[in-house]
Amino acid sequence: MFNTNHTPNIGEVEILREGLRVVTAPNASPMTFTGTRTYILGEGEVAIIDPGPDDEKHFEALTKALFGQRVSHILVTHSHIDHSPLAHRLSQTFDAPIFAFGASGAGMSEPMRLLAGQGGLAGGEGIDTNFKPDVLLQDSEEIRGVGWKMEAIHTPGHMSNHLCFAWEDSIFSGDHIMAWSTTLVSPPDGDLTQFMISLEKLQGRSESIYYPGHGAPLINAQKMLSHQFTHRKTREAQILEEMNAGTVHQITSRIYTDLDHRLLPMAARNVFAHMIDLHQRGIVRSQGALAFDARFSLTKD
């Protein structure tokens, strides 16, 4: 199902199809796979999708790739530090506006906002708190450039201000859906309830090719959407079976027995996201305040 065979030439332009190129940033890691993929859409007058980290080598690679061209749009799927920080510098360099759903925290659900205000959730990993778009995009809004048009699709879940961008038969999917891995959902910025709704939203569309924020293009995207939806439901069932373990960390260690130890903290965040969702649905309860280190049990016990 997953494609982990991806060996891009970092910093070099890769032609994906007519009118679409990509440059991969030098920020490979267990969380970013082979690095952030910055897409260049159009010819002559172009749009940049997901500028990436504020990295000097990546900036130089992009300015080289964009030499002699006009940048009309800088589009950001979401404001994690591996996707949005270079937007400001590119905006100044090319005199181009930044388009996004909103600043970090925009689109956060009311239940998650209330939980975040109570404290105890931790989270907030890798958030670009300085991100400020010039133009706010609404769900289903159309964006037009020279020779192309796109539709903004609000897909909160991985992050509350996450957008996907539909173009022709494809979607720039950011971190919502990728070919190499399932998606991290880390509260309070990540919201599993919203994530599942966003999965269903994309399942209702016809685009078959996804260009994600990390890794190779995703072919037959609908199959992956179905797999990820089923995966989350399976994970929920595993968590419910291990509720006697009590805490998020204990449940995580029982479920993720063969995971790279470096990824266990993120796996725990995913389990916590499920706990919040189950708590909101009245399936589990916490001893004391709903928090990352709380003990949980089934409400029917």
Image: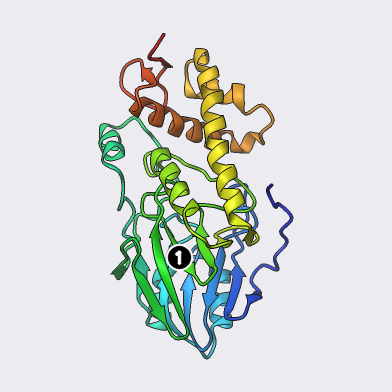
Point out the residue furthest to the top here.
301
**Rendered position, 266 above or below 60:** above
Does dot 1 land on a helix, a strand or a loop? strand
Q: Nearer the viewer, residue 240 or 61?
A: 240
Q: Residues within 10 Å of mark 1 (few under 14, many from 20)?
A: many
Quadrant of the frame with the C terminus? top left
Residue type indicated by callout 1: Phe
| Quadrant housing residue 256 | top right
Compared across the picture, whether 202 is left or right of 35 comes to left
Image x and y of residue 284, in percent = 39, 20
**Is 72 left, or right, of 16 in this rendering?**
left
| Residue at the (40%, 27%) spot, across then down | 278
Residue 236 at x, y = what percent?
A: 51, 28
Find residue 74 and report its horizontal and vertical position in percent.
42, 73
- Residue 212 percent location from the top left of the image: 56, 59
- Left or right for 81, reference 6: left
Residue named by callout 1: 165
Decide: is 127 above or below 116: below
Q: How many marks?
A: 1
Q: What kind of colouring is applied to the model shown?
A: rainbow
